[in-house]
Amino acid sequence: MPDEKVFLLKCKECHAAFFTEGEKDFYKKKGLHTPKRCKSCREKRKFQHEQRRKEQELAHVLANLQFEQVEEVEMQSADPNTTLYIIGNGFDLMHGVPSSYYHFRDSMGRRNELREALEMYIRKEDLWADFEESLAYIDDESMLVTLNDWMDIFDVKEQDDDDFSAANFFMASEAAMAPTYTIMEELPKQFRKWIVTLKPTISNTPLKQIINTAARFINFNYTEFLETIYGVSKQNIFYIHGERRDKNKELILGHSDMANHELDFNASDFKSDQLRMKNQTTYDLHATAGYQLSNYYSSTAKKSNDVIKANKETFLACADIDTVVVIGHSLSVVDYPYFKEIIKINRNSSNMKWFISWYSAGDIKRIDAFAKNLDIQPKQIKLFKT
């Protein structure tokens, strides 16, 4: 019969017994200080510390706020004929829809080829926090440094060698660039597969006093909950990035358009010695891999200008808008082109009123950056908390 587990310490907070002999050995080996609190209490303290930090940050932001804060009653008086609602993912989250990119990550499970490619090759500390823009930060050098190894594995000869095989040459390139192929091929499929499963988990309507169903809507979400929860007519909604019910059209997502992203294959410019070229074949192989990287950047970019051109009449209809209500939109840089087009089209953009929802200090900071980038005066913007 195995020995009974012996606890060596009592938690300073809850007085529960914790810390075994095995943990003691681990802490000693790693040179760590002996804990005074059990894991549960340590996590609780960490959470409380993070909450205090967020509260202090919010207090500081609000103390220096340059925008007026308003209640929902002020939005109720807006004329629906000249009001445009812009709906972001925060709208779905408010209604209990598990629609964050963290939820998308979790839906894939831990041992998923796409997730592994993303988490291994995207150079972002938290790629899921701003997933779309993170797609631009692929670790191309980590893939390129493997090319020499793949050349050896596929026995790629020099091009003037009688035994040179074009098939082996391209297989080496494809093997090195495999993560880009995985992301390009699997992301659209797995993303749509996840999107179609989403549904609200709460039945209330927190925005009932804000949403005027007779107004116009630009919906950045792929879901139809504006229709099903608030009764907004589909004719009043522009699903700017596609909708999940339409299986014939792709769902648009991606980073800021980097179609002009170019890779310089001058050997002297490479940071890593492993990337320096040995011969013309090696150089050509890196160039071939570079074409694939360029294809990746272009493929994973959100082609905002194409969306605007394809929906020219919809944007032209914004010429008479005098009130814009933004609900649950992160105001990420990747979507700036759409907002800039709305402002450019408008006949009196300097007098447009912007009502923008916020939830955290980070939201207010993004609103401030948004206003400065789009040259919207602080007096035009009013905030409301959701």
Image: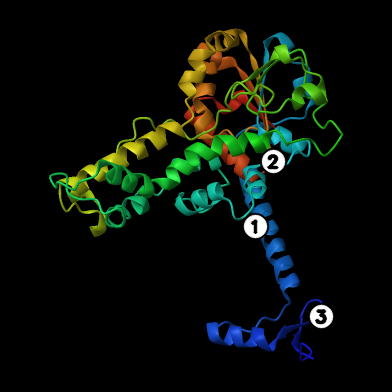
Could you give the CA–CA distance between mark 3 and mark 1, rounded to whole angstroms?
28 Å
Query: Local crowd at mark 2 within 10 Å, few (<14), some, or many (≥20)?
Result: few
Q: Position of residue 311 (x, y in %)?
A: 54, 13
| 262 up-or-down from 179: above or below | above
Could you give the CA–CA distance between mark 2 and mark 1, rounded to whole angstroms?
15 Å
What residue do we see at 40% from left, 36% from top? 297
Residue at the disc numbered 2: 359
Number of marks in the rendered image: 3
Q: Position of residue 118 (x, y in %)?
A: 51, 48
Marks 2 & 1, CB-CB < 8 Å contact: no
Of the image marks 3 and 1, the number of the one nearer the N terminus? 3
Residue at the disc numbered 1: 53
What kind of element bears circle 1? helix
Of the image marks 3 and 2, the number of the one nearer the N terminus? 3
**Residue 213 figure quarter:** top right
Q: Quadrant of the C terminus?
A: top right
- For badge 2, the amino acid type reads Tyr
- For badge 1, the amino acid type reads Arg
